[in-house]
Amino acid sequence: MEFSTVAQVRFGFGSAPGKPAPKDAQAILAALSGPDVLHQRWPGIGTQIGLKVADDFHDLKKDFADKKPGAAEAFKLQKAKINDLLVQGLQIALARAVEDETGLRERLWAFWRDHFTVQGKRRQDVALAVSHGEAAVRPFITRSFPEMLRAAVTHPMMLIYLDQVNSFGPNSKLAKKRPDRKLGLNENLAREVMELHTLGVGARYTQDDVRQLAELFTGMRVMAGEGLNFAPELAEPGAEHVLGHDWGGDPAKLADIYAVLDMLALHPDTAHHLAHKLAVHFVAPEPDPALVGALAEAYSGAKGQLMPVYEVLLTHPAALGADFVKVRQPFDYIASGMRALGLSGEAVMALDGKAMRSGAYWPMRDMGQQWLAPPGPNGWPEESEEWIAPQQLSARINWALRAPQALGVPVEDPVGLATSALGPRLTETVATMVPRAETRAEGAALVLASAEFNRR
């Protein structure tokens, strides 16, 4: 199978009418190396906006509790604004996915966003969760992993999500000053940084390493209107021993935290963990060890720079086979469906809130992937069986039937859709059934609900 077909399906969001397929790996790498034009066109919300939304929510909630005049309506409007920002975040992500020249930048953004999973479990933090992907992940996906790790881990949303804001050095100045408050250590962030973000499950670290890293992390907090702030009086005094080396000391500094994150980012176990995770996500549930090894070697050789890793992913023979064994997750599936139906990014952005909810937000939820609400810090599952339960398949079929009308793109030629959307993957069964459909909408649904379209 030609590279262009494999690349569109495995590394992008499928084909789109009138959009040329990437001819080779160098074309994709060149697009990645260029400016992030889609972020410039649809920038999303940054950290400061997320913080302000949270601060405004807190103030309005207090006014509501105090029964101030007009507070009830203002508080209601703020909650609606937060809901709208969440849906708008999805809308921007879909518009970029539909419009992306090769698809890989947006696929990588989704991958790294999931790698550094956050969730606004409190309504006031939802906008901050949206900003995390925009401010702490996206700028670094074509740069280096150490930079991304620093930004993602110390972003206010990560500190809130993994309870770092409730972690205090047991022997810190504040703990000694306020023994009545029982201020203690929280290991959540340290554990997930080692287990999920860097070294991986089963890597060469111990529970003592986790605890020592958690002590080093103390001092980081989130200040209203400011974001990340380092407070030495909250930090555990003295040096911490992590993976055989001492880090930090007196006085405690944020620079010490950055230093240990850099070490973890460039550890050999991290190279293997990231390589395996990339190969599983993009290629196969049990990837060829040679591919994983080549990705890890590229990562280590480039000292965490990511473009050389992507070059291996796009060119290694084990990544270019014609067997598509992965199931498109709901976001990928809907984005691919929008592309196949011919929507442009501008058309996606022109959809009103009702169309976005009925055409994407609620269907994603019904398919098992509620936007920015993963089941835990380890993100969304990669296993195909997690996405093809009867209820989830039913939701995909319902979306395939209703999407053209919900999105305002009725299909005039289902046979043409089958040919353009599936290309050489069009099977005789689908090619036979589509012309026999009773309506054009049902013909389109046969294409979008087909096993071939659901796989990548």
Image: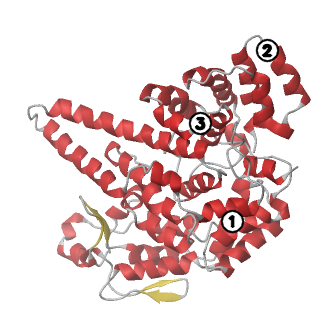
388 and 218: which one is in front? 388
Q: Is residue 204 above or below residue 327?
A: below
Q: Earlier in the sequence, mark 1 or mark 3?
A: 1
Cα–Cα gap, marks 2 and 3: 28 Å
Task: Give the quadrant of residue 156.
Answer: bottom left
- Residue under circle 3? 368
x then y, percent, for residue 276 = 71, 64
Q: Residue at x 66, y 63 (%)?
A: 30
Cα–Cα gap, marks 1 and 3: 29 Å
Q: Quadrant of the C terminus?
A: top right
51 and 236: which one is in front? 51
- Residue under circle 2? 437
x then y, percent, for residue 87 = 44, 37
Q: Residue at x 73, y 53 (%)?
A: 22
Q: Residue at x 70, y 19 (%)?
A: 412
| Label 2: element kind | loop
Tell me which amino acid carries mark 2: Ala
- Residue under circle 1? 310
Residue farthest toward the left in the current orientation of the protein: 69
